Image: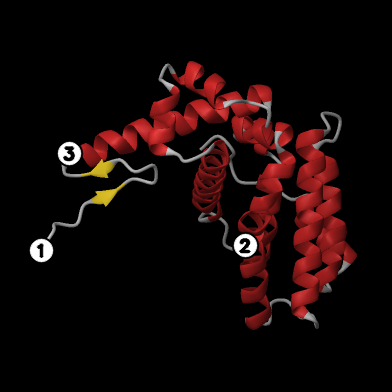
Amino acid sequence: MAKTVKVAPGGLPIQGRNAAYIARNRAALVQAASEVFARIGPEATIEEIAAHAGVSVSTIYAHFPSKLDLFATFSREATTGWQTWVDARLSGIDDPLQRFVAIPRLLFRQKLTHPLYAEVARKNFPQMSRNRYELTTAMRAFATELLKAKILAFDHPQIRLENYAACIFSTYEKYVSDENFTEEECDISLEVALSLFNISPAQAKKLAHGELPDLTL
């Protein structure tokens, strides 16, 4: 019976210590690609990415079948990394509503905390929009938990959650694409969006403009 050999996405075999080597090379390529996507945008070529990474084009294709796959990999990993960063900051907030609003408010500080992510989003937003669902998953899930716990009370949850996610995502697009659109204006957009959950204007204002966790931790 033939032995089964695991392979990386591009077809490289993963065996023993080779797995760690492949993982490091792959991560380095994703990092190099993100820097090129941030500088050039979607017009960036595999040749430009390879030159920036200091590798051959064939090395990139050994790990990633296409430029689209390479970009999708960066997008997924950036979203996961950012969410892990957010979770660490939410751990110090006791009030569930404050934790809920902290998620989009931290997203609206991404140019300060994760400038490379924000610049890739600015230059490649149509491509990044494919990741909209993943980017807003935690917010929708949190609102659903608050509804079940009766901390929030609203009807037509699916419609309200979709509209809330759309508002947050469009504000994020404005934030990364318009250098004159401030974090404070993002908070005002959030304040308005919170009305979808029957949060009073006074409470929404307090929540959307309250103290944030330390961004430098």
Q: Amino acid at mark 3?
A: Arg
Specify which label sits upstream in the sequence, 3 or 1. Answer: 1
Q: Amino acid at mark 1?
A: Met
Depth check, front residue: 31 or 174: 31
Please state which of the two labelled residues, at mark 3 or mark 1, is closer to the viewer.
1
Q: Amino acid at mark 2?
A: Thr
Q: Circle 1: is it few (<14), some (14-19), or many (20+) Cα within 10 Å?
A: few
Is residue 199 visible in this depiction of the protein? no
Q: Which of the labelled discs sits on residue 1, or is there none?
A: 1
Q: Which of the labelled discs sits on residue 17, or is there none?
A: 3
Which residue is most to the left?
1
Depth check, front residue: 76 or 60: 60
Above or below, comparing residue 78 to residue 30 in the picture:
below
Quadrant of res 152: bottom right
Query: Distance from label 3 to label 1 (Cα)?
Result: 24 Å
Left or right placement of residue 49 versus residue 38 in this view? left
Image location (x, y in percent) of residue 64? 45, 39
Q: Which of the labelled discs sits on residue 165, or is there none?
A: none
Query: Distance from label 1 to label 2 (Cα)?
Result: 44 Å
Q: What kind of element bears circle 1?
A: loop
Specify which label sits upstream in the sequence, 1 or 2. Answer: 1
Depth check, front residue: 100 or 165: 165
Query: Distance from label 2 to label 3 (Cα)?
Result: 35 Å
Q: What kind of element bears circle 2?
A: helix
Image location (x, y in percent) of residue 177? 80, 34
Please state which of the two labelled residues, at mark 2 or mark 3, is closer to the viewer.
3
Is residue 83 visible in this depiction of the protein? yes
Residue plotted at (63% across, 54% down): 135
